[in-house]
Image (cartoon, rainbow, N blue to C red):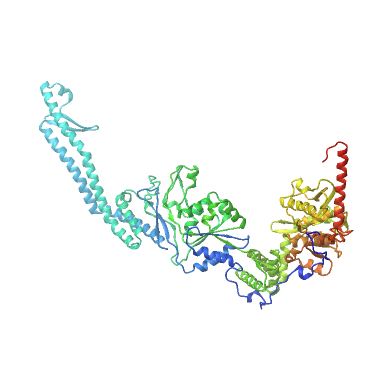
Amino acid sequence: MDAAVTIAETAVRPLTAEQLYRPTDLSGLTFSTTAELQPVDGLVGQARAVEAIRFGTQVSKTGFNLFVIGPNGARMQDAIKAMLAAETAGKPGPSDWVYVNNFVDPDKPIAIELPAGRARNFHDAMHKLIDDLKSALPAVFQGEDYQRRQAAIDESFQKRQGEAFSALRDKAAEKDIAILRTPLGFALAPTKNGEVVPPDEFSKWPEAKRHGVQAVIEALEKELEHIVRQIPRWETERRDEARQLGRDTAKYAVDQLIEDTKDTFKDIPRVVQHIETVRADLIENFGMFVIKGEDDGSEARDIRTGGPFDRYEVNVLVTQDIDRSVPMVEELHPALGNLIGRIEYVALHGALLTNFRLIKPGAIHRANGGYLLLDVRSVLMEPFAWTALKRTLRRGEIAIEDIGRFLGLTSTVSLEPDPIPLKLKVILFGDRLLYFLLAALDPEMAEHFKVLADFENDLPRTPENEAILARLLATLAQREGLNALDRDAVALVLEHAARSTEHSNKLSLVVEQLRDILIEADFCAREANRSVILRADVDSALTARIRRAARLRDRTQEAILEKVALIDTAGTHVGQINGLSVTELGGFSFGRPTRITCQVRPGSGKVVDIEREVELGGPLHSKGVLILSGFLAGRYALDTPMSLFASLVFEQSYGGVEGDSASSAELYALLSALADVPLRQDLAVTGSVNQHGEIQAIGGVNEKIEGFYDICEKRGLTGTQGVLIPQANVQHLMLRKDVTEACAAGRFAVYPIATFNEGIALLTGLSAGVRDADGAYPLDSVNRRVEDRLRAFASIRRNFTSQNTGNGAPAS
């Protein structure tokens, strides 16, 4: 007895219209239009994801950031923003951050934290302080008191210098020596009667007298040299006194303004400390306020701090409104600089200059203390962004990195700003494939993103959930400013939502798709001057969407109808069957029939997949063909070696073939060729098969049925045409209205197939055959013919081998 199939053959009946399309049940809602429905608050059908998001946002430990995954078009960002806004409402916002000049080391600007909303006040206060000093300091230094004291210092220096020279001059005069000032300095010369003796006359003096004068001059020169050496020290003392006077004067002018500024921020010790540092620097560098102005055109400025007064400014990095709640920042372009901040440069005379005022914040700075929302695909596509994000999370602080320095692209002076402590929750969004790839290939991902929030693609199609989705449509219409939908329009949208999931018992939660349909239906309603969206408007919108994308489908059908692509929809053929496939391009899917043929002859037991041999068949398709070999070997002529050569091919297939959804059709073609029994060409087949002959579910069942129906309908429905689908796919059916109407009228049929026996019987009109108590298939059954043919092949091969061996040829 065959252990693989124990169920007796039963006649397969076509599905009823009710099984081909499930209408919406809105009996639980009483409304005429969606304007009467209460909008839905929160996420619909995402209990699992909501639980994960709440946990991830409330736990404050390191590494518990969120990775949100789900289908494209689920609008996960919008849903989570709304959820976070509700949870963070009323919570205090984070601190402000500024950068100020480091007067000790300008290459390392200092970061200062201030309470929310105070950074701008600090900036304005320091700006006002410098503006006030630009007026106050020059006024003080131009005042009578400063001028008098400065004159006294200068006079004291001049007097000291003059007295020293006067005493020396008097002493020299007593000895008839004059002190002369020359371009090269001072010189001493003898005098006579108050007049300098010329050198010629001095040379005629007696030698003794000359020696005496020279001795006096040498002694006086030493005294003169001592005085001249004292002058720089006196000048230094004068400058020190003048500088101290300047400091004292500047302190007098600065102190009151500094104290007024400090009073405003006395509750922030770090700001008070900086203001004291500014006071010391102002007193030390008062000269730039007095000697030169900011706009004197001088280019002798510090490249680290900018203009002479910029050193006292405040760079407001991040500021919050006092009444603002926790920040929620979505960075759409997460380049490295946009993510962790950057240092900008200004070109001057061919050099790139920068200072602390050119430090710019990144998204992490703006979101610090709150939530940062990032699309993981965008992050991964930006060089160094993913690594920088992980490094920032590991360090627990935000350090601005100049990537140009790391790569050796720039050799200019740069900055090393103080890092800022990080208190941030990062939420990544992406599709499931990216998450699983990162989890497998990047071990650091699990360290930083410990919470997974997986959005559902769909939810069960119960009356309660249909009512909830109807309210979601009302919410979308209200949010987008669209006309309300009437009851029938809502029903059709929900039916389309079921078809989108490829399951009649589920509803799609891809909000973007539903929103697009509503917008297009609203356009149709307004074109017809209607204030309510009707079912006809939704139907027009869906039809228009297909028509816009269906050029390739129409060309494919045109090729079949013109017999360029050979597809029969009538008659019978041995070893030939219509398989069904789905093509998806640009979000639009359509089904198309493909002729599958098979040829058999005696051989070594090999089933050749021509697609695989020419490298057009993918691994899944090749697997399906190999399963056929296992099916044959395990079902027929078990006492005889498999002596078959069979070739299978998708005719007129010029591209790759992938998937196993045609393996049942290939099996029917193979059995037809072996049994020499013709197959009906007015039927098309889809479904995979296992080694036990059970027909398994496939994808795209609606598109496949409609693809064959369209060809039959254009050639003329005969009432015998139809499609064989796996019985497991019945629950997925949501066929077009014209297809269901044709099936209801008996002009087309959809047959649910559970085993290959049911399919081969329907395709051949013969009994498939089940083994009897003796293990034999009934005469004239398809299975009996297949087994007899395989035994005949084995006999042929045995005879051939025996003859070749008897002639001295080696046995194969």
Residue 768, quarter of picture: bottom right
Residue 719's spot in the image, x, y percent?
A: 86, 65
> Which of the image's four quarters has the C terminus?
top right
Report if residue 275 is visible in the image: yes
Pick the residue in front: 243 or 399: 399
| Side (left or right) of 49 relative to 16 | left
Q: Residue at x 61, y 61 (%)?
A: 70
Q: Nearer the viewer, residue 110 or 88?
A: 88
Taking 309 as reference, is 236 above or below it? above
Q: Position of residue 251 (x, y in %)?
A: 27, 54
Compared across the picture, whether 154 is left or right of 812 comes to left
Residue 657 seen in the figure: no
- Name the one closer to the observer, 142 or 236: 236
| Residue 214 drawn above or below residue 567 | above
Return the x and y of residue 643 as percentages of the image width and height.
83, 47
Could you tell me which residue is drawn at 52 percent across and 69 percent down? Answer: 86
Q: Quadrant of residue 258?
A: bottom left
> On the rendered image, what quadrant is the N terminus found in?
bottom right
How many numbered circles does the render carry? 0
The residue shown at (40%, 62%) is: 115
Q: Please provide percent x and percent y for residue 692.
A: 77, 57
Q: Is residue 664 left or right of residue 382?
A: right
